[in-house]
Amino acid sequence: MQYRFDGPEDAPVLVIGPSLGTTWHMWDRQIPELSRHWRIFRYDLPGHGGAPAHPAAAVSDLADRLLATLDSVGVQRFGYAGCSIGGAVGADLALRHPHRVAALALVAASPRFGTADEFRQRGVIVRSNGLEPIARTSPERWFTPGFAAAQPAIVEWAVQMVRTTDPGCYIASCEALAAFDIRTELPRIGVPTLVLVGAEDKVTGPAEARTLVAGIPDARLALVPGASHLAPVEQPAAVTDLLLMHFSTAWQDTAASIPVPPSPGFAAPFAPVVPVAEIAPAAELPDASPTGRSDRYDRGMKVRREVLGDAHVDAAAAASDGFTEDFEELLTRYAWGEIWSREGLDRKARSCVSLTAVVASGHLGGLAQHVRAALRNGLTPVEIKEVLLQTAVYCGIPAAGAAFEIAQSVIQEETTPPA
């Protein structure tokens, strides 16, 4: 991974991870103070900030790449602070490699980021329109209105970060967030954890922060007033103070960690920070009990949700009753658990086959959902057009004409960026 160090070479290492669409420069305002006490390791996500464009479609893949990079520079044990997807990477490290993480700070993070449908839909929009729609709307997701109005230069800097990101890597990161869900695993995070969130964050706000605190043993919650999603940019002093207090205390209290080096006058300026929000009662976590169904059914349900989306699958389940439930199970186990799960074709190829088969059979009632699935599986509108042109030759002009009409409507709906 692309990385840089700041701070004394003999100090303990604090790794800092960025948010989706940003670079390590989102932490610039924290570096002068943090690097007085730790050796700061910052990294860029693939395709962000000029980093090599090697997409990673899973948070665990990003975490593994980060560990390999840290291994290559001789870093074994470290503190970790990450924002948004950077926080997801930190949580994954704390779950799978707890012996490597001395202390953890999750900034603007969540055990599950929105819904899988939301992030896969964002991927469809980027694949069809590029990153400009995402870049244009980033300031309203990242900053409070007052800050955005008062700091136009920072807003433009944020927009440019997104514009210069590799679209394929951005889409892969969306896929990673779509699949990320550690709600049932939170009690296994055993490292000292600070959950930090902007009070006005509309992306991963206080509710998500309280879910993290309720699930992670002995986690602490800090709410930063006057900040939205990129709290380290919008309220740099408050975030810096919270990180200083957390990591200095956590490292001193954690056995076998590397002690924080003494620094003249360090303790005095930092009084204990009282979180500006109460810790919520434990959130209800998803039922982790076995389903009692076969592995093939469970695998099929996972693939079905990834391809068709949670909304479609949930609607089908809600409409099912005693008469249709066996058919729904057969469909999930056989079509999705056996055929769609095979490795002989990737999902783009299977979507091409499915679109052709639906047109050829005349079952156009199901074409809209397969067009949506094709977009989620990585086909572009141009590629879908080519598939339908091919069906015109082998399935007939009338069938292809009707298919074009349906597909055009779906593509317009799915690829039009939000206003």
Image: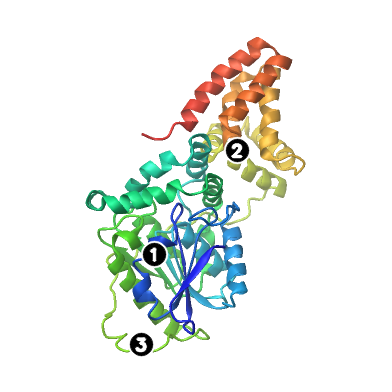
Q: Residue furthest top?
A: 398
Crowdedness of circle 3 by 10 Å Cα count: few (<14), some, many (20+)? Answer: few
Alpha-carbon distance for marks 2 and 1? 33 Å
Residue 251: mark: none
The residue to which callout 1 is attached is: 27
Residue 119: % across, % down: 49, 44
Q: Is residue 332 visible?
A: no
Up-down relation of residue 380 to residue 389 (above or below): below
Question: Which kind of residue does numbered mark 3 sit on?
Answer: Ser
The residue to which callout 3 is attached is: 263
Residue 332: % across, % down: 67, 38
Q: Is residue 154 visible?
A: yes
Question: Which kind of residue does numbered mark 1 sit on?
Answer: Trp
Q: Are marks 3 and 1 in contact (CB under 8 Å)?
A: no
The residue to which callout 2 is attached is: 378
Crowdedness of circle 2 by 10 Å Cα count: few (<14), some, many (20+)? Answer: some
Sequence-earlier tag: 2 or 3: 3
Q: Secondary structure at mark 1?
A: helix
Q: Are marks 2 and 1 in contact (CB under 8 Å)?
A: no
Q: Secondary structure at mark 2?
A: loop
Sequence-earlier tag: 2 or 1: 1
